[in-house]
Image: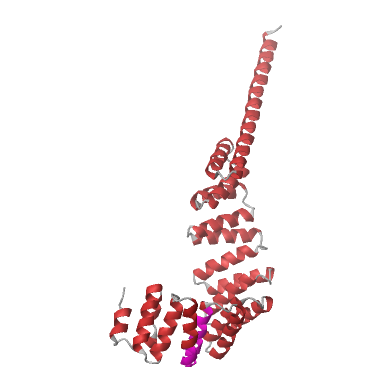
Amino acid sequence: MSDGLISLILAAILFVGVVGVSLRYAFSKERDIQEYLRRAQTYRSRKNYDAAIGAYQRVIELDPENITALQGVGILHTQLGRYNEAILAYEVLVKIEPQDHRVLNRLAQLYEKVGNEEKALENFEASLEISESSVETYIHLGQLHYRANRMEEAIEDYNKALELSPGHLDTRYYLADVYMSQGNGNAAIEQYKMIISALPDDSQGYTQLAQAYNQLGRHERAIEAYEQALSLTPNSPHIYANLGQSYYLIRNYEQADQTLQYALDLDPDYALAQYNLAVSLAEQRQIDRAVQYLELALYNDANLMQIARTNPVFASLSDHPGFSRLLNLA
């Protein structure tokens, strides 16, 4: 046998050995991956989420682009409120599956949760470039644009969501909120009426409709809407508190005070009812009682302080020692 033939045979034997080792390693690696995935699923079923994450991490060490493990890590960190850790997993998933709009949506929602609205917008917009059929994506974009005071863009987003799903009533509420913030009460009323048409037994639509009427100065119509809301939710201190406000806005102080007192009968510590009663009493120049109810309102809800300080009724009484003392509180 020639030396060349011997070398060739030895090389073949060496190659077969190397291939065999490689195949055994590959089979062993795949077996380990499947075992860790099985463990992760078992831990999840037992709600031992940290152990499940640990098992998924072992899979990722063996296969950094394992979609099942990356999704598992992202989902579990999200459930546990560890949004930054979840973001890391979804960022890898986006690189692996850049055309999956669902992954982009989840990543955008996580950025929204951690307050990075710029990255949230970026990922929602990237999602829409892939699929323009997601109502949820348009709603999230609308909310982001609304918070950024980009109202026209928010309106456009919500209208696109409604084109895809005209019966999505939450979107109509969001759209009406934008119109209300713009002072466009008539456009808001149109949305609230469509909501009421779809849900005639839900008091929320009537309550929101009443607020839009009040914004337009149509207080009698607001009273009608609040009374309709009360016919559906008869023991709501919130509705009574707002109805009482509508009565004092038309200077029906007797009815306002009775209505606001009834709200306080239902909930003695309800700050909005106390505040509105203080306004009504101040307008009637029942100053000591007004101070009393304003003090209670501010005690129960310190957030009312800024509203009270800018209220023209209270401003006209700033020389009174009671109002001066309360409204100078930090």
Let me know if residue 241 is in the magenta part. yes
Percent across and percent down for residue 292 are 36, 82
Q: Residue furthest right?
A: 1
Pick the quarter of the image with the C terminus.
bottom left
Occupied quadrant, residue 5 = top right
Percent across and percent down for residue 16 are 68, 20
Image position of 239 (left or right of 38):
left
Occupied quadrant, residue 228 = bottom right
In the depicted structure, whether residue 327 falls above or below residue 34: below
* The magenta segment: 238-256
Residue 38, visible in the rendered structure: yes
Pick the quarter of the image with the N terminus.
top right
In the depicted structure, whether residue 226 falls above or below residue 51: below
Percent across and percent down for residue 123 are 56, 58
Residue located at (29% from left, 82% from top): 324
Occupied quadrant, residue 316 = bottom left
Magenta: main secondary structure:
helix
Residue located at (66% from left, 71% from top): 162
Residue 305, visible in the rendered structure: no
Query: Residue 158 or 262: which is nearer the viewer?
Result: 262
